[in-house]
Image (tube, rainbow, N blue to C red):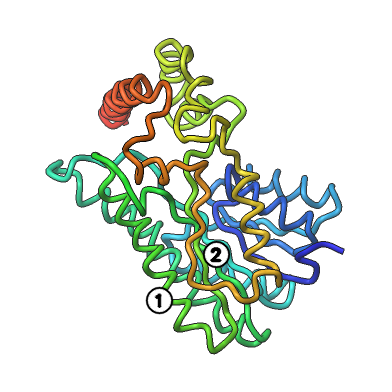
Amino acid sequence: MGRLEGKIAIVTGASRGIGEGIARMFAAEGACVVLAARTADRLQTVAAEIEAAGGQAVPVRADVSATDDVRRMVEVAVERFGGVDVLVNNAAVTFFSKRIDDEEMEAEYDRLMATNVKGVWMGIHYAVPHMRRRGGGSIINISSVHGIASGGHMSAYAASKGALIAGTRALAVELAPHLIRVNCISPGRIWLDDDPSEWVRRRFGEDAHREYLARFRDWLERARGLQQPLPIAGLPVDIAYCAVYLASDEARFCTGANFVVDGGMTAELADPSFHHPGATELAQRQQEMRAWFAEVRRRADSSG
């Protein structure tokens, strides 16, 4: 019997990466899963693969920044499976922020907050009544280490993720009388593809992908173990294991917590005496990469 047998779960951002990993593991542990994301084709594929492996999954195309989509996502869980026990708010807009004095900063800020914060709150808004009817539930918000400590050009993103951590604590208190637990997971650097350059191809096209590989292929693999004290790559499955625990009855006394799953990244930030071998080179290459992404984005904006 799986650890989530009989539970009904919604996972947003479930077509790729962390959300996909969580959805697959939830289904493997016996949960009925509603997979929500904006990319319908990929979502259908993931759901079909889960069902082929013996799980139960329903795909729902949903943009969490659109309130009607969020409401429909919850309605599908109730209609198909009978309720909601677990909500994983994973969908997010993730990109390097513009400078605070950039003329387009306001539009970027609004987009980030609409998806990363309002989308989460509306999902909780619609899911909570159904959790109450079932005698409780578990809400898992996926934040980021950027909500704890961040850097330049990340202010809007960091603000959105910090809001999730603070809001998680407040909601944990508010919903505790209903036996609804609210917790947060803050991942560090998670490698979402076997080939870490694939997301560049998806977002910017073939020309940018070739340019990216030409400039950064030499250090991409090395970088996996250079971004935190543990010299291994963080993977979606590492976040999924934590999410399964928080969704399960094993975490019955756990609420209002932020689980940092980062290979020691934030511990290193707290201890300036720790200097990871290669950290200086990594910082230099990251600055170079940020500048390159800014240029590619400008090109994409001017051509679109």
Q: Residues within 10 Å of mark 1 (few under 14, many from 20)?
A: few
Q: Residue furthest front?
A: 273
Real-space Cα separation, disc 2 to disc 1, in angstroms: 14 Å
Q: Amino acid at mark 2?
A: Ile
Judged left or right of residue 37, residue 143 is left
Judged left or right of residue 119, residue 253 is right
Disc 2 element = strand
Q: Which residue is mark 2?
A: 140
In the rendered image, residue 243, in percent from the top left (x then y), is placed at 62, 58
The residue shown at (41%, 46%) is 266
In the rendered image, residue 162, in percent from the top left (x then y), is placed at 35, 58
The residue shown at (45%, 52%) is 92
The residue shown at (47%, 24%) is 223
Is 251 placed above or below 194 here? below
Disc 1 element = helix
Q: Which mark is residue 109?
A: none
Is 113 placed above or below 281 here? below
Is 102 placed above or below 196 here? below
